[in-house]
């Protein structure tokens, strides 16, 4: 009721002034390359061929953005144009929104590392995502899977912890890249279990999975969305998932919490942001429309089938999640070997 009241006051006030929001198209900025977020695709190496392939095969991130685009445009009655701004990893696109007019017409679709780790990985940034952006709505959570090659007996979480304590440094783990969500969750696993495992940095989930499939490395932490296509052929085996609850498409796979580290709960996420000082009523309106889209059963099924989880909630809920992750991930990354 509070949200609806804010929306009503916003529309009433702007209508009386002759400028009801929105009265022109919106821009949704995507700071990732066409292959998707760095959690999935790694750091792109651009070429003419790669650009052609990217246009032929939309990424998971593009799919999510399309759902946000359609949900906002359909209900607000204005087009929502999506623009890729990918130079400087994700920093250029994020800064573009952070410095835009706070009027609700320029929005950002971003993931966890883009928002929570930018100041840690890039101390010279000319903006601060925590101060210059306001969370609007979480769209989806991205569980991270702990996986192993299927060619030999798959170890349990408990076995990995016991062996890593007994033989420090004997187990390497693959991630989708330094500073990625999968790397962060691998470091959280190491910190909470006191298991002396060693991080091996790969350029994206596919590269990490390739190393696991060919038994170059024993285990990995990889987004579940990237792992699912490898399960049908038996190329990899799931050990556990890092989220608080089991994933609906894999009800027999335990959580890391259940399998050996009580209290373990960490996932990636995707969400929408606006420039700081965007009126609260506009933020509430956008949050309401995104949540309304997430309430549709067809979209819920589609997200779950791709290894994600729909994440409806208030803007305040999203802000609390961002602040929690910013604090814990920054602290964890600063303590990780090879990072500032």
Image (tube, rainbow, N blue to C red):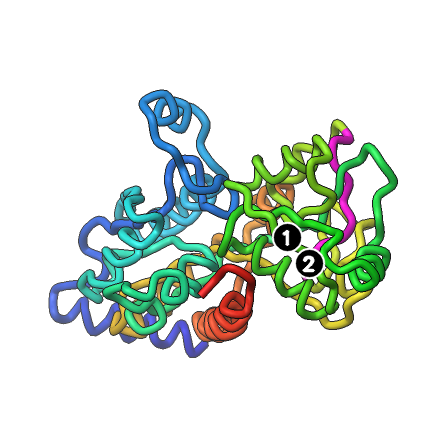
Residue 28 shown left or right of residue 328 in the figure:
left
Q: Is residue 240 magenta?
A: yes
Pick the residue in front: 248 or 329.
329
Q: Residue at x 20, y 63 (%)?
A: 99
The answer to which quarter of the image holds residue 280 is bottom left
The Cα atoms of the two marked residues, 1 and 2, are separated by 6 Å
Can you identify the residue that label 1 sits on? 144
Q: Residue at x 63, y 46 (%)?
A: 174
The answer to which quarter of the image holds residue 249 is top right
Secondary structure type for disc 1: strand
Residue 272 visible within the image: yes
Q: Which residues are magenta?
A: 234-243
Q: Quadrant of the N terminus?
A: bottom left
- Asked if the residue at tag 2 contacts the one at tag 1, i.e. Cβ–Cβ closer than 8 Å, the answer is yes
Q: Position of residue 223 (x, y in %)?
A: 60, 47
The answer to which quarter of the image holds residue 137 is bottom left
Q: Position of residue 86 (x, y in %)?
A: 31, 44
Pick the residue in front: 129 or 108.
129
For mark 2, does the 10 Å Cα neighbourhood hold few (<14), some (14 to 19), or many (20 or more) residues? many
Q: Residue at x 74, y 68 (%)?
A: 193
Give the vertical position of 273 relative to 59 (above or below). Answer: below
Can you identify the residue that label 2 sits on? 242
Q: Residue at x 36, y 71 (%)?
A: 130
Q: Position of residue 235 (x, y in %)?
A: 74, 31
Q: Position of residue 45 (x, y in %)?
A: 38, 33
């Amino acid at each position: 009721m509070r949200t609806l009241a804010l929306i009503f006051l916003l529309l009433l006030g702007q209508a009386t002034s002759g400028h009801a929001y929105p009265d022109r198209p919106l821009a949704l900025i995507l700071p990732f390359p066409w292959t998707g977020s760095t959690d999935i695709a790694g750091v792109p190496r651009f070429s003419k061929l790669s650009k052609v392939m990217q246009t032929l095969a939309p990424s998971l991130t593009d799919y999510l953005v399309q759902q946000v685009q359609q949900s906002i445009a359909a209900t607000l009655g204005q087009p929502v144009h999506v623009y890729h701004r990918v130079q400087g990893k994700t920093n250029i696109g994020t800064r573009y929104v952070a410095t835009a007019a706070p009027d609700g017409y320029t929005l950002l679709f971003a993931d966890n590392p883009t928002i929570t780790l930018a100041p840690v990985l890039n101390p010279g940034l000319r903006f601060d995502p925590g101060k210059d952006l306001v969370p609007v709505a979480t769209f989806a959570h991205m569980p991270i899977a702990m996986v192993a090659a299927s060619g030999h007996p798959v170890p349990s979480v408990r076995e990995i912890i016991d062996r890593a304590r007994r033989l420090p440094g004997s187990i390497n783990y693959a991630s989708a890249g330094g500073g990625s969500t999968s790397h962060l969750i691998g470091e959280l696993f190491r910190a909470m279990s006191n298991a002396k495992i060693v991080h091996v940095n790969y350029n994206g989930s596919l590269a990490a999975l390739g190393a696991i499939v060919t038994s170059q490395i024993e285990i990995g932490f990889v987004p579940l969305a990237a792992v699912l296509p490898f399960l049908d052929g038996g190329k990899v085996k799931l050990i556990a998932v890092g989220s608080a609850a089991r994933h609906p498409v894999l009800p027999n796979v335990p959580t890391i919490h259940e399998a050996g580290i009580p209290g373990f709960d960490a996932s990636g996420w995707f969400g929408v942001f606006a420039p700081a000082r965007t009126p609260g009523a506009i933020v509430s309106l956008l949050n309401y429309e995104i949540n309304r889209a997430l309430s549709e059963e067809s979209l819920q099924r589609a997200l779950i089938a791709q290894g994600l989880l729909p994440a409806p909630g208030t803007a305040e809920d999203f802000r609390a999640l961002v602040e929690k992750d910013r604090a814990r991930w920054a602290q964890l990354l600063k303590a990780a070997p090879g990072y500032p």
